[in-house]
Image: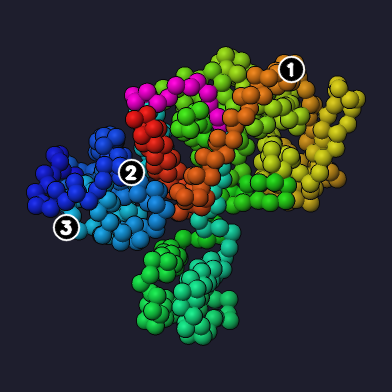
């Protein structure tokens, strides 16, 4: 159960925070900027008010997740750091001597408390609301793009995944303690997962009992990652079958297994909307949702900037209807609006190829017809895959020796866009698109969105929501500091 009232802190050490946490500390600035009571309001229905043991305050649990996104830590390392980092304890609204949570509480909180609450929209809308209140958002420009995240449990067997984790730990130890060379147990020669699990346990025991660097953060983090991998296997997670992750294509000859985060960001570099999907989804399909969500959050929009993935006929018509300038260069292979097939094929802008509903990419393409008019592009698929595809009904005609997908290249609305993209105004606005590439990099590298931390779309949405919330708050704090 959760308390109806906030607990008053009676610790005699609370004044220490005023001495050791400077005014310009980022976590202190975030605490002063955001009233986190909205989290309690959203989560009250997930708790009992008068039954059961007293729960850890929901706001504190949410702040733990926020710290995890800001610093990209494992659950174990996050809790360990919160024992001694006073800025963490201050942010978590704890007294200096107060005990921290058990790391397993974070897993339960994510799985039991955050379902069905539309956390992604809630957190983004909150940051946009704060930015508008502070007068930070002045532009009416939206920049859109998508970034991918590798699945936590990628397409490896459990044995391969565990082996990679134990190897990472051994490597970290060797770099810091040369004397450990030759002290680790013999690697298993069988293909049995049980043998690999036993070997991983032996590796951890060897590090903890014989290595002089076992307590160093670089090594402890690898140990904790390996422990989590073993626990996930014991919990019947599958490394090769994440229930929601899908194969997406980064180019014609490279792919990833995981998820996509479709983003909208304003000219002040604050993310105003996001949609998280499985990896195979096409970027261009989510323009309308991103614009609508941004407007619902409070943004006024007169211009949307995106790459060629967003220049499809449907998006051009939507932009006209909303009286928005769409700064997206035409690509002939995605500008077809006349195809009436029942089966939907998605265009992958990076590979320059269409992908069928089953996720198979075209092998090659040909252009036919007269130049400047009536040209068509035909995409050819591997017919051997089509013959055994479970989704072939309505897509592949049984007995056919080839499978193609064709489209016309231009329509009237594209002619207007083609003329618009030659203007100086279009070219100047298009130069702003680099900003969202930098934002994607910020989300993925310092803040861990490069890889999913857990299996399933819900876990990815929670991770994406807290990561975007953290990045937006950091940006708002920076802009407010620049105004002073």
Q: What is the x, y in percent for residue 97?
A: 16, 58
Name the residue furthest right.
370
Asked if residue 264 can be seen in this view, the reply is yes
Q: Is residue 109 left or right of residue 197?
A: left
Residue that numbered label 1 is attached to: 419
Real-space CA distance between mark 2 and mark 3, rounded to the nearest whole angstrom: 22 Å
Residue 26 got which mark?
2
Q: What residue is shown at x 27% (from left), y 51% (from top)?
A: 87
Which stretch appears magenta? 132-144
Residue 174: image x %, image y %?
Answer: 50, 76
Residue at (54%, 68%) from the top-left corner?
164
Residue 452 percent location from the top left of the image: 49, 52
Q: Is residue 121 above or below residue 184?
A: above
Q: State which tag comes first along the sequence, 3 or 1.
A: 3
* Quadrant position of the C terminus in the picture: top left
State the residue at coordinates (58%, 76%).
191
Q: Earlier in the sequence, mark 1 or mark 2?
A: 2
Frontmost residue, 400 versus 421: 421
Check disc 3: other Cα within 10 Å, few if <14, some if 14-19, many if 20+.
few
Decide: marks 3, 1 in contact (CB < 8 A)? no
Dot 1 alpha-carbon crowd within 10 angstroms: few under 14, some 14 to 19, many 20 or more: few
Q: Residue tagged by mark 3?
A: 97
Residue 134 is one of the magenta-drawn residues:
yes
Residues under labels 3 and 1: Cα distance?
Answer: 67 Å
């Amino acid at each position: 159960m959760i308390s109806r009232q906030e607990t008053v802190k009676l610790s005699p050490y609370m004044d220490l925070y005023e001495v050791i946490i400077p005014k310009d500390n980022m976590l202190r600035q975030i605490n002063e900027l955001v009233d986190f009571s909205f989290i309690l309001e959203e989560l009250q229905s997930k708790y009992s008010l008068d039954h059961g043991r007293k729960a850890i305050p929901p706001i504190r649990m949410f702040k733990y997740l926020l710290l995890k996104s800001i610093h990209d830590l494992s659950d174990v390392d996050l809790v360990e750091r919160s024992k001694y980092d006073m800025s963490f304890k201050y942010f978590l609204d704890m007294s200096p001597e107060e005990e921290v949570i058990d790391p397993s509480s974070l897993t339960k909180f994510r799985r039991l408390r955050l379902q069905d609450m539309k956390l992604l929209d809630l957190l983004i809308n909150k940051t946009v609301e704060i930015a508008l209140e502070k007068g930070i958002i002045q532009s009416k420009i939206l920049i859109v793009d998508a970034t991918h995240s590798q699945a936590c449990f990628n397409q490896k067997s459990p044995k391969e995944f565990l082996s990679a984790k134990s190897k990472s730990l051994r490597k970290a130890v060797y770099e810091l303690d040369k004397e450990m060379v030759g002290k680790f147990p013999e690697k298993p020669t069988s293909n049995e997962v049980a043998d690999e699990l036993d070997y991983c346990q032996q590796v951890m025991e060897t590090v903890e009992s014989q290595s002089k660097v076992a307590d160093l953060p670089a090594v402890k983090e690898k140990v904790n990652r390996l422990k989590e991998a073993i626990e996930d296997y014991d919990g019947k997670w599958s490394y090769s079958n994440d229930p929601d992750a899908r194969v997406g294509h980064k180019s014609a000859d490279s792919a990833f297994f995981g998820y996509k985060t479709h983003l909208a960001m304003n000219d002040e570099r604050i993310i105003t909307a996001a949609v998280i999907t499985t990896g195979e989804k096409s970027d261009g399909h989510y323009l309308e949702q991103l614009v609508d969500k941004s407007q619902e959050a409070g943004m006024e929009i007169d211009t949307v900037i995106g790459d060629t993935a967003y220049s499809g006929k449907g998006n051009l018509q939507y932009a006209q209807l909303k009286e928005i300038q769409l700064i997206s260069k035409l690509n002939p292979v995605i500008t077809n609006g006349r195809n009436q097939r029942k089966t939907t094929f998605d265009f992958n802008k990076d590979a320059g190829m269409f992908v069928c509903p089953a996720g198979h990419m075209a092998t090659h393409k040909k252009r036919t017809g007269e130049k400047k008019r009536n040209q068509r592009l035909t995409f050819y698929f591997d017919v051997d895959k089509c013959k055994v595809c479970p989704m072939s009904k309505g897509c592949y005609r049984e007995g056919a020796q080839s499978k193609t997908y064709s489209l016309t290249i231009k329509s009237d609305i594209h002619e207007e866009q083609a003329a618009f993209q030659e203007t100086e105004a279009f070219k100047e606005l298009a130069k702003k698109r680099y900003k969202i590439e930098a934002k994607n990099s910020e989300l993925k590298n310092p803040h861990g969105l490069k890889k999913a931390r857990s299996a399933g779309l819900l876990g990815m949405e929670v991770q994406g929501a807290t990561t975007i919330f953290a990045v937006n708050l950091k940006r708002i704090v920076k802009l407010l500091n620049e105004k002073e």
